[in-house]
Image: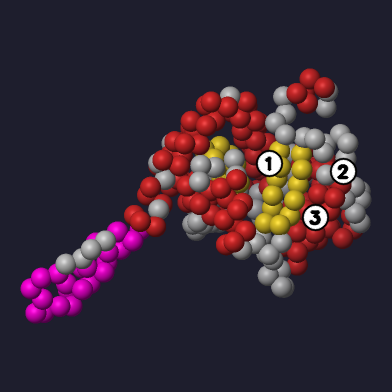
Amino acid sequence: MTPAERKKVNPKVVFFAGKAAPGYYIAKLTIRLIVNVARVINVDPDTKDLLSLFFLPDYSVSLAEILIPASDISQHISTAGTEASGTSNMKFCLNGGLLVGTVDGANIEIAEEVGESNVFFFGHLTPAVEDLRYQHMYHPVPIEEKCPALAQALNEISSGTFGDGGVYEPLLNTIRQNDYYLLTEDFDSYIKALALVDEAYQDRTEWIKKSISTSAKMGKFSSDRAIQDYAQECWVRSFLDNSKDINLLVITL
């Protein structure tokens, strides 16, 4: 990266937080890789002023209460069609954080409320997923041809840049051999979305407008709205349907 290119880069601090189920070996490998990547880039003189990476263990509500309000961007990147509806993206956006994500799950509903101009979408849509998986199975294309940038990153891991590369082969093979979650299909689009984030962040006034607008338009996802709807559509109706001798019902919300 040239000095001119460095000037265009927004310095970033990236946090990963989560837990792996005791028997979920690939998830544990993923966490191990994140930790070892952090050990390298956080002390690299060429990168440490541009990118810092941290894995926060034992993710909990108490930690989320600190992390979520501090976020400028949160990433929710499930393969289209695989996420029923998470809620963490709602929490980030309620606190004014902008969203990077696939067109999946609650990301779609959030974009409908806050406007797609305030969301950085990427990746294939759900109708394309099964066909892409079929192509992977019966007409595979080498990753070096399909997605050279991702292939280079995987080769860095295999070569030992972040510790014993052989340890990570089971994880890397989920991409090289099957790629059920279509990383090779969505990676280039993901990188372009991050470039749009960098570009948008350069205009601080516009970024703040996006943040305030996102937070202000998230009322649909508040607990107040949810409780009010339950009270009006479920609890009151159920109570009335099952009450024979009721003359007066007063509810205070």
Q: Quadrant of the C terminus?
A: bottom left
Who's the residue at 79% across and 20% down the image? 4
Who's the residue at 55% across and 37% down the image? 120
The part of the chain drawn in magenta is 226-249
The residue under label 2 is 43
**C-alpha separation, residue under disc 3 versus residue under disc 2:** 13 Å
Q: Main secondary structure of the magenta part?
A: helix
Who's the residue at 61% across and 51% down the image? 67
Q: Residue type at mark 3: give it.
A: Val
Total number of numbered labels?
A: 3
Q: Residue type at mark 1: give it.
A: Phe
| First along the sequence among labels 3 and 1 | 3
Q: Which mark is residue 187?
A: 1
> Is 3 drawn above or below residue 67 in the view shown?
above
Q: Callout 3 environment at 10 Å: few (<14), some (14 to 19), or many (20+)? A: some
Q: Is residue 186 left or right of residue 232?
A: right
> Is 10 drawn above or below residue 3 in the view shown?
below
Q: Is residue 12 magenta?
A: no
| First along the sequence among labels 3 and 2 | 3
Observer-nearest of 142 and 111 = 111
**C-alpha separation, residue under disc 1 versus residue under disc 2:** 26 Å
Q: Considering the numbered disc 1 on the image, is that residue within a helix, a strand or a loop?
A: helix
Q: Considering the numbered disc 3 on the image, is that residue within a helix, a strand or a loop?
A: helix
Q: Residue type at mark 2: give it.
A: Val
Q: Which quadrant of the view contains residue 186? A: top right
Q: Which mark is residue 35?
A: 3
Q: Is residue 174 left or right of residue 90?
A: right
